[in-house]
Amino acid sequence: MKMTRANGSVTRRPYWSPGFLYRSVTDFMRCMQTLQSPSPCVTVFGSARIAAGDPIYQLARQLGRALGEAGFSVMTGGGPGLMEAANRGAQEAGAHSIGCRMSFGFEQAPNTYMDRAATVRYFFVRKVIMCRHADGFAVLPGGIGTLDEMFEVLTLIQTRRMHAKPIVLLGSEYWKPLSALMAQMVTFGTVSGRDVDLMKITDDIDETVHILKEAIFAPRHESIEHRDVKPKASSSVQTARSHEDSTI
């Protein structure tokens, strides 16, 4: 960040400061203490801009309820729109409904359907919390923020910074352009088919819940689809890899 002085000279602030580090760490600690989930957790991503009268809002509400009835806790970004709808449905099912929200001055007024919530100041903290606490992900129609969160998850799995977790996108018509783009990227060789296979696209809530349950409650070695077929590594190498994967 540039700082211009009265005499016209320009200096730069350091890219980090003790205050930044302290705020980041305290946000992490507060979230990890506040947002503990008593049951397997599904993080739901989706737009903050879709109002309660929209059919997609009702879809998100039904999804939250179905996840709750299936025994999942539901985590969202804690804001309005589809986040509110998913939290609302989870509460209606008697499930644990939690949110990790940003301290925005727009769009992101907290919704009132959360049992517990924490507010953070930095996006990277929010992403870590929403990934680390999740056993699976449901992605509803959304904008740049939703895409950012979804591709963060895909990148973490692709680079083996996180164990493979199920990712289900609801709304096949909405996600059709993204699906076509990903297919084109496979054709050009910029991503692999395995990366695309990490995402499942459907219009059916029951199928969404089934995919999540099947992957989350399956034994670990069966639920991880994103792996290479290679000779078995030594126990020391496996231990090191396991330690690396546990970072998220």
Image (tube, rainbow, N blue to C red):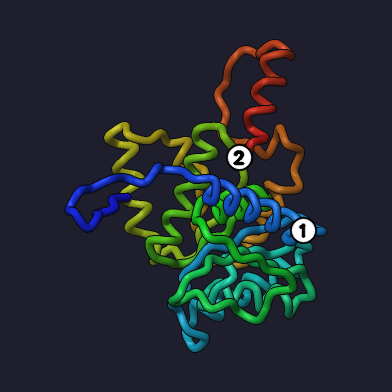
Residue 76 left/right relative to 149: right
SS at mark 2 in the image: loop
Which residue is depicted at the point 61% across and 72% down?
A: 86
Kindly identify which numbered label has been placed on residue 164: 2
Where 84 falls versus 96 (above or below)?
below
Can residue 202 be seen by looking at this rendering?
Answer: no
Q: Give the residue at the far left of this rendering.
A: 8
How far is the residue under mark 1 from the one under mark 2? 20 Å
SS at mark 1 in the image: loop
Which residue is depicted at the point 63% across and 32% down?
A: 245
How many numbered discs sit on the rendered protein? 2
List the residue tagged with mark 1: 37
Where 50 falls versus 208 (above or below)?
below
Quarter of the image holding residue 91? bottom right
Where 53 falls versus 177 (above or below)?
below
Q: Give the residue at the far right of this rendering.
A: 38
- Dots 1 and 2: beta carbons under 8 Å? no
Q: Tell me which amino acid carries mark 1.
A: Ser
